[in-house]
Image: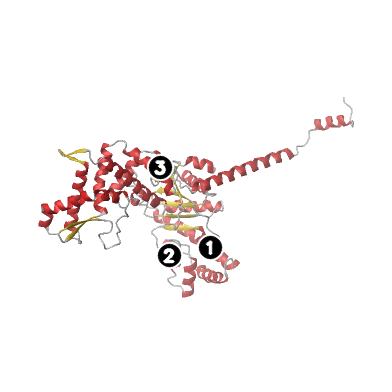
Amino acid sequence: MTCKELVCAIENPLDDISIMDDLIDIYLERPDHIYSGLVKNDFYQNQKKKTCVYGEKLRDDFYLAIFRDWKEAIQHISRKGLLSKEENRKARILSFYLNGCNPTNYDEIMEVLNGENATIEIREALTDFRWDLLGSFSSWKHIDSRYIYGRTHKRNEISHRLYINCDSYLSHFIGLEFIKKCKERRLKFYFKFDGRAERDDTMVFYSDTKNLCSYIEILEEIKDEFGLEDSLYNPPMLTGKIHGWIGYGSEPNIVGNRYSFNSLRELHLTKCIHKEVGSWVRNHLGITLNLNGRRMSNQSYIEQVLLNCVEESARNSIYYSFCEDELQSVEFRRAVLTGIRNHFSEILDIFEGFKDQFDDQSDDVSLNSVVIPFHDKKIYLSIYHVREAFCKQIELLRGNDPQFRERLRKRIIMTSPSFGISANYAVDMNSIPLFRKQIQSEEKESIQSSTHKSRVKRREWIPMTDEEIRQARIQLGYEKKD
């Protein structure tokens, strides 16, 4: 596969309009944090992952292969002195320690890496050289060739991600085969996996642009050689599918590296939903609704939902000290409704994101809230109340406006460049020049290769036949024609 073919093969997740329904369902389930829904497999039907009785053996085989490569690398460093003076000294200490270590399973490998019966010097060396240093405090298992081979090479620049969604027991099997094939091709590698496979991104492979196609070819080879089709599932919903089962995602290139592929899109999609719904609400406050036989304007419906939310919070929140008689009084309800009406435009602004969202870490409940006075007390209408009311609006909107999904999709597409995302929602804009440069490089190599072959062909010596030699001699006068 060439880079040009790869770019054409990456599907745009937004081409499927039904993804808008999935996004809305995810938002309604947890409007303050849609990230978990973007990477969970709850929204794909018939996507039930399988377990395997050989899972433990596959895990042991995987880690034993890595341990052998790591041990060999440490011994090589100690013999050749490939690093700094201090690092070489630690490598020699560690090599001596590892000579007597021959684990047979994962648990024994962990005992070796933890240095449970080792000296302080050996533990210090292990701290510097152990291959599982990366992501040691994460639930993900990170596998990086740079650490396996004792930091004797630099990691490739990470510009792209490939996502695989598979049965949990396959993570170790695919990982081991991937390492083997990378070694055959002399490729560096870096990937991580979630051993529980509770998400759609069970495995994530990181890549530069030059080797991206090679990694895809390796994954395809593994799938075909071992017939894994029945154990592979849809990748995360916002990735660009390649060949129906590999998910592509750009590595975000944002100052501070605050966002992952999905967290960047979570921020963008949440803002789009808020803006689209907020815009619709502003333009449809006066429409008449028929709810359980009761007719009311849309604004009155929103006010009623907000009132119910405030009453519920006042009963259960530690920030309020209202008695039940106050909550049931006409005066309390009138005060809340008056406050809602007086601040209705501000409430819309809060939802659409013109004001920052409520700070979960702060003890001050007045932050980003509408404050409604009631005698000598205060009633707070927070972002949480506003979200709950607008979730009702989303349900109403989706059920009564057939154009809502298309308008939401258009808003996402139109505003994605401001978040560094291209028209293909799986591809960030910073990836486009990388692809273009690689395509140009491959085309240049192809031209040079064909030119070289043609030159070789013109210079190729082909021996003359006896008849050709005889005719040549006749032309030169060395022989007479019969």
Alpha carbon distance from label 2 to label 3: 50 Å
**Labels 1, 3: front one:** 3
Name the residue that disc number 3 marks. Answer: 414
Measuring from the top left, give residue 252's x and y in whole percent.
Answer: 45, 52
The residue carrying pointer 1 sits among few (fewer than 14), some (14 to 19) or many (20 or more) residues within 10 Å by Cα, namely: some
Q: Which amino acid type is shown beneath numbered disc 3?
A: Met
In depth, the one of 258 and 275 nearer the eye is 275
Name the mark nearer the viewer: 2 or 3: 3
- Badge 2 amino acid: Met
Could you classify mark 2 by the number of other residues whose Cα lies within 10 Å: few (under 14), some (14-19), or many (20 or more)? few
Q: Which residue is mark 1?
A: 151
Q: Is residue 355 visible?
A: yes
Residue 213 visible at all: no
- CA gap between label 1 and label 3 equals 44 Å
Residue 73 placement (x, y as % from top left)? 54, 63
Q: Secondary structure at mark 2?
A: helix
Q: Which sits earlier in the primary sequence, circle 1 or circle 2?
A: 2
Residue beneath the point at 86% across and 32% down = 473
**Amino acid type of the residue that numbered disc 1 sits on in the rendered structure:** Arg
Residue 377 got which mark? none
The earlier-in-sequence mark between 2 and 3 is: 2
Of residues 373 and 314, the one drawn nearer to the viewer in this rendering: 373
Eyeballing the image, is 85 above or below 272? below
Q: Which quadrant: the C terminus? A: top right
